Amino acid sequence: MSQSATAAKSNAKDTVTVTDNASGKAVTLPVMSGTIGPKVIDIRRLYSDTGMFTYDPGFVATGSCESRITYIDGDAGVLLHRGYPIEDLAQHCDFTEVAYLLLKSELPTAAEKEKFVYDITHHTMVHEQLAMFYRGFRRDAHPMAVMCGVVGALSAFYHDSLDISDPHQRMIASYRLIAKMPTIAAWAYKYSIGQPFIYPQNGLRYAENFLHMLFATPCETFNVNPVFAKAMDKILILHADHEQNASTSTVRLAGSSGANPFACIAAGIASLWGPAHGGANEAVLTMLKQIGNKSYIGEFLKRVKDRDDATRLMGFGHRVYKNFDPRASIMRKTCHEVLGELGIKHDPLLELAMELEKIALQDDYFIQRKLYPNVDFYSGIIFQALGIPTTMFTALFAVARTTGWVTQWNEMVEDPNQKIGRPRQLYTGRTRREFVPIVRRG
């Protein structure tokens, strides 16, 4: 077995001893080593041996699972999928190839890719009754609200892929989710603007098909610009998976109860909807509109640096990356390709974004704190340039991340050490007290 596929192991000689200073009792815990990354203290016996458990809000220092899918080194600015750097994948692969890699652990041969693309392409249609389901929503419903409902409802239409103990059914459900998510997202957009649904076209590639469903109408032929299709494909690749983030952890937690795959992915969509997660690129455009023009950038950054001011610089820095987001440089190049293709040279909002980027990258305050532009800063600008409304930004993120979600879900189901998620808590409420009947309560 190759090193990249070996499970995490604990070495009897590699341990950590934890001592309770009050009682003097000590417990020795094994230290586990993965193939790459920091070592991990195995605390599974901590509570049974000491009567204590750990306190870690946000799980910033807690590994909830063992995974072989994605590796991030935030300090070095590294993102690997199955061992391959994101830079190489974005440069040499299309989205379906990366999806295959995530699901199957290896890059496909030409024949394997052709078969995978065929299978995904021929699952892109959704059940016709779902069109009526859409019409139950208000026209002004947020696309993410629609997607939560529609994806969850897939379990009512595809009964032949709900048995999570059957590997074949799990793979069918995975293919269906990856294939149908662009259709579901595009239909949510079409419904919101009162246009007819556009059905997927088997002759189009994944990203191209998505753009076609978003922007085509039955009135005339619509040809997708290849530069825009390439940009969308890059966006999908760069957002395909990102280790144990909030939405992925939500999918795993929901899945740990044995819930069906469609319900688990719907839970992930709900988590992604939060502005601190999938809504970051929308927040970038909101910030740019608040700045207004280039002459106010200096004053805005002054407010950002003021600890007593709640103003935040959106699209810079990252929860995990303490260096440059490796996806950002790829997205920056793609952003300029799109703007160049559109001939946008004097759009005030986009000029403002580029000027803000330039100033922030030269400011010692942001350099010292390693607050570099992240992937959300550039993706929001691309979506704006393509004419995609801000309400759809997170929906596009969900289309990309579905591949990561189903991959993580499959890994979780197959993990023999997986247990139903049940975090502990540090209780700080009232201690036990005597119940007083209502007639005696003053």
Image (cartoon, rainbow, N blue to C red):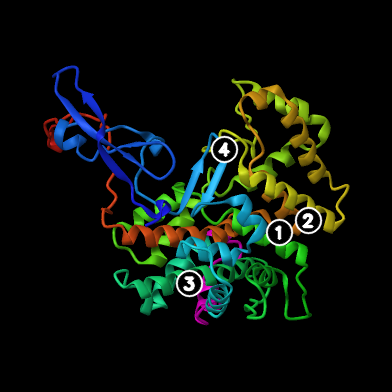
Cα gap from disc 2 to disc 1, whole angstroms: 7 Å
From the image, tell me which residue sits under label 2. Answer: 338
Outermost residue to the front: 1
Mark 2: give few (<14), some (14-19) or many (20+) Cα within 10 Å: many
Cα gap from disc 1 to disc 3, whole angstroms: 23 Å
At 56% from the left edge and 33% from the top edge, which residue is drawn? Answer: 322
Determine whether label 2 and label 1 are within 8 Å by CB: yes
Mark 3: give few (<14), some (14-19) or many (20+) Cα within 10 Å: many
Q: Which percent across, then down, holds residue 397?
A: 58, 56
First along the sequence among labels 4 and 1: 1
Cα gap from disc 3 to disc 2, whole angstroms: 30 Å
Q: Amino acid at mark 3?
A: Tyr
First along the sequence among labels 4 and 2: 4
In the rendered view, would you say 344 is above or below 319?
A: below
In the rendered view, would you say 220 is above or below 233?
A: below
Which secondary structure is most common in the magenta stretch?
A: loop
For the residue pair 191 and 221, the one nearer the viewer reads as 221
From the image, tell me which residue sits under label 3. Answer: 175
Image quadrant occupied by the N terminus: bottom left
Range shown magenta = 123-144
User: Does the stretch in magenta take in 124?
Assistant: yes
Determine whether label 4 and label 2 are within 8 Å by CB: no
Secondary structure of the residue carrying tag 2 is helix
First along the sequence among labels 3 and 2: 3
User: Does the stretch in magenta take in 111?
Assistant: no
From the image, tell me which residue sits under label 4. Answer: 318
Cα gap from disc 4 to disc 3, whole angstroms: 31 Å
